[in-house]
């Protein structure tokens, strides 16, 4: 009897195993296979495919729960499995992936550096995108046509493109702008902003001594910062230095912290520090402590992405952007601006079986429609039409009290990180009653752009050059930062400038400049 039962039981088990295998094969058939794609329109593939994506999560929501990816899956028929470590540990996790060779199909919003692109393309872990762009990416091609410098800057030394950028030329801030406290200016009856470093000094003295916050105390802080990099780009620019490191000056690469203008900058900042016109806690305070001083209405001049946020008030038109001033030894100021793009935001790896579908998927983000959907989603999500004929929108307030931007971060990955897309200047998003955005655009156009310069194009270095640069900068950058602080605080007198120059010369600053000059010359020769 037992023997008779054995065969039916084996048959049942085998049937179950075969059924399970069949189901598993069907479940995994979408992933890791090459699919036929449609050359245009949607869906991109008729038969659903699954790809893996690796990117940084800023903590608002899981990417699989975001409306953007859900709607893109419906539109394209491409499903993603996500690996999204927290943003603050993302670089470590990214390095581990490459080291273990356990790669995703796609890196998204990963900010791959040029050195990483060179390293991993040489190992053939990243695939060239040139042919894919030519065949499947009309929107990216249109972007290259409008901005030839974008294609130039993302083309590696071997002539291939391995990663796609974020391109946004709306506000080319390299770092947060500097703003005046408008209420202080009004109290001091300032009709015209300073245009020279001497005029700026005089205004800072007035802020310190004339009680512009009106509380009867001399508690005003004319200028504050949290670490010098918070403001030094601006102030060294007043003396003709475009970058503390390598930068271009009339086609010649120089090291900013070795220039006479940098010495003039240090002398000026030392004067402000000694007279307590520059916050003497600049090298010790946290960002929260700096912010608390702003919200207490004690600060006259500061750097921040938006002035109202720093001062604890709505962003409006009452706090003007700083007018760059001209300092000693400079014909005019120079302010470093962003090239308007962020490299390495989309890359396809060698394990991706569907690179064509992947390219078509990301190309949509570079269209006007795709960029708008990635940026502000659909009507009813975070906005509604105020006047559609005039392209005028109205933001929808959140009933739970959360900000619209924070809520947006639960719907799209385009929040807190750079993502692969192209912001089209001919289709700006305008909100009803929003005076601040046009004000900022005008302030940037009138004050920053006339003296703005990209300090150094996003050049590629050879592997050998990268090693040399890393070895030099390992000690040089820390020493320059340390000496900047010592000269400003007076721990080291400016009379030791000559000794400082001799030291950075020994550290290899001339060699560093030669490497970047060679790379810059290569960049200029590229067509």
Image: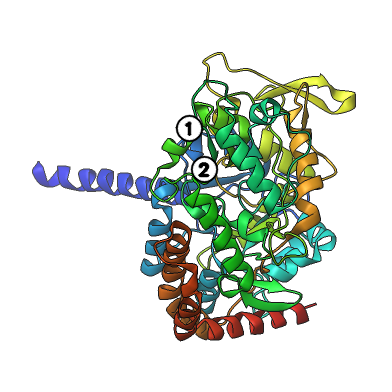
| Spot occupied by residue 475 in the image (x, y as percentages of width and height) | 40, 74
Residue underneath mark 1: 293
Viewport quadrant of the N terminus:
top left
| Front position in the image: 199 or 53 | 199
Answer whether residue 70 is visible to the viewer in this image: no
- Residue 527 to residue 464: above or below: above
Q: Is residue 319 left or right of residue 469?
A: right
From this viewpoint, which residue is outermost toward the left? 2
Residue pictured at 43% horizontal, 36% vertical: 288
| Front position in the image: 161 or 417 | 417
Viewport quadrant of the C terminus:
bottom right
From this viewpoint, which residue is outermost toward the top? 399
Residue underneath mark 2: 224
| Spot occupied by residue 86 in the image (x, y as percentages of width and height) | 41, 45
- Residue 344 to residue 183: above or below: below
| Front position in the image: 27 or 359 | 359
- Residue 400 to residue 220: above or below: above
| Spot occupied by residue 370 in the image (x, y as percentages of width and height) | 73, 43
- Which of the numbered marks, if any, corresponds to residue 376? none
| Spot occupied by residue 12 in the image (x, y as percentages of width and height) | 27, 43
Q: How many marks?
A: 2
* Mark 2, other Cα within 10 Å: few <14 / some 14–19 / many ≥20: many
Of helix, strand and loop, which one carries label 2?
Answer: loop
Distance CA(mark 1)–CA(mark 2): 9 Å
Task: Say how the picture is coloured.
Answer: rainbow
Q: Quadrant of residue 271?
A: bottom right
* Mark 1, other Cα within 10 Å: few <14 / some 14–19 / many ≥20: some
| Front position in the image: 268 or 518 | 268
Q: Is residue 111 left or right of residue 157?
A: left
Of helix, strand and loop, which one carries label 1?
Answer: helix
Q: Are marks 1 and 2 in contact (CB under 8 Å)?
A: yes
């Amino acid at each position: 009897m037992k023997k008779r039962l054995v065969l039916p039981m084996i048959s049942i088990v085998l049937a179950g195993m075969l059924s399970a295998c069949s189901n598993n094969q069907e479940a995994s058939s979408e992933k890791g296979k090459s699919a036929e794609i449609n050359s245009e329109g949607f869906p991109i593939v008729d038969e659903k495919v699954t790809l893996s994506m690796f990117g940084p999560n800023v903590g608002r929501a899981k990417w699989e729960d975001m409306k953007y990816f859900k709607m893109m899956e419906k539109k394209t028929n491409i499903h993603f499995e996500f690996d999204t470590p927290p943003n603050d540990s993302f670089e470590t996790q990214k390095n581990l992936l490459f080291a273990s060779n356990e790669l995703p199909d796609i890196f998204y919003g990963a900010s791959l550096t040029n050195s990483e692109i060179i390293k991993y393309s040489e190992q053939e872990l990243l695939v060239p995108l040139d042919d894919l762009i030519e065949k499947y990416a009309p929107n990216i091609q249109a972007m290259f046509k409008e901005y030839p410098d974008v294609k130039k800057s993302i083309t590696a030394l071997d002539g291939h493109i391995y990663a796609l950028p974020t391109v946004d030329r709306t506000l080319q801030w390299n770092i947060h702008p500097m703003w005046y406290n408008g209420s202080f200016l009004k109290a001091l009856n300032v009709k015209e902003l300073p245009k020279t470093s001497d005029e700026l000094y005089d205004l800072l003295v007035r802020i310190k001594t004339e009680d512009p916050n009106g509380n009867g105390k001399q508690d005003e802080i004319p200028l504050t910062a949290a670490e010098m990099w918070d403001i030094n780009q601006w102030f060294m620019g007043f003396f003709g230095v475009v970058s503390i490191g390598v930068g271009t000056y009339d086609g010649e690469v120089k090291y900013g912290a070795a220039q006479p203008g940098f010495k003039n900058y240090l002398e000026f900042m030392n004067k402000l520090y000694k007279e307590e016109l520059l916050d003497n806690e600049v090298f010790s305070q946290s960002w929260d402590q700096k912010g608390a001083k702003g919200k207490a209405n004690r600060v006259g001049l500061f750097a921040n992405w938006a002035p109202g946020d720093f001062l604890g008030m709505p962003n409006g038109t009452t706090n003007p952007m700083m007018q760059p001033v001209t300092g000693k030894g400079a014909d005019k100021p120079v302010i470093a601006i962003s090239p308007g793009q962020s490299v390495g935001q989309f890359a396809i790896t060698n394990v991706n079986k569907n690179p064509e579908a992947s390219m078509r998927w990301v190309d949509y983000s570079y269209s006007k429609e795709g960029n708008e959907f990635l940026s502000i989603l659909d009507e009813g999500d975070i906005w509604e039409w105020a006047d559609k004929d005039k392209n005028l929108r109205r933001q929808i307030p959140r009933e739970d009290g959360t900000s619209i931007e924070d809520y947006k971060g639960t719907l799209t990955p385009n929040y807190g990180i750079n993502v692969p897309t192209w912001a089209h200047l001919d289709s700006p998003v305008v909100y009803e009653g929003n005076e601040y955005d046009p004000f900022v655009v005008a302030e940037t156009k009138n004050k920053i752009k006339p003296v703005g310069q990209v300090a150094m194009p996003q050049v590629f270095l050879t592997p050998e050059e990268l090693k040399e640069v890393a070895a030099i900068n390992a000690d040089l950058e820390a020493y320059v930062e340390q000496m900047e602080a010592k000269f400003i605080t007076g721990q080291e007198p400016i009379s030791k400038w000559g000794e400082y120059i001799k030291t950075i010369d020994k550290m290899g600053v001339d060699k560093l400049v030669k490497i970047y000059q060679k790379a810059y010359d290569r960049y200029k020769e590229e067509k």
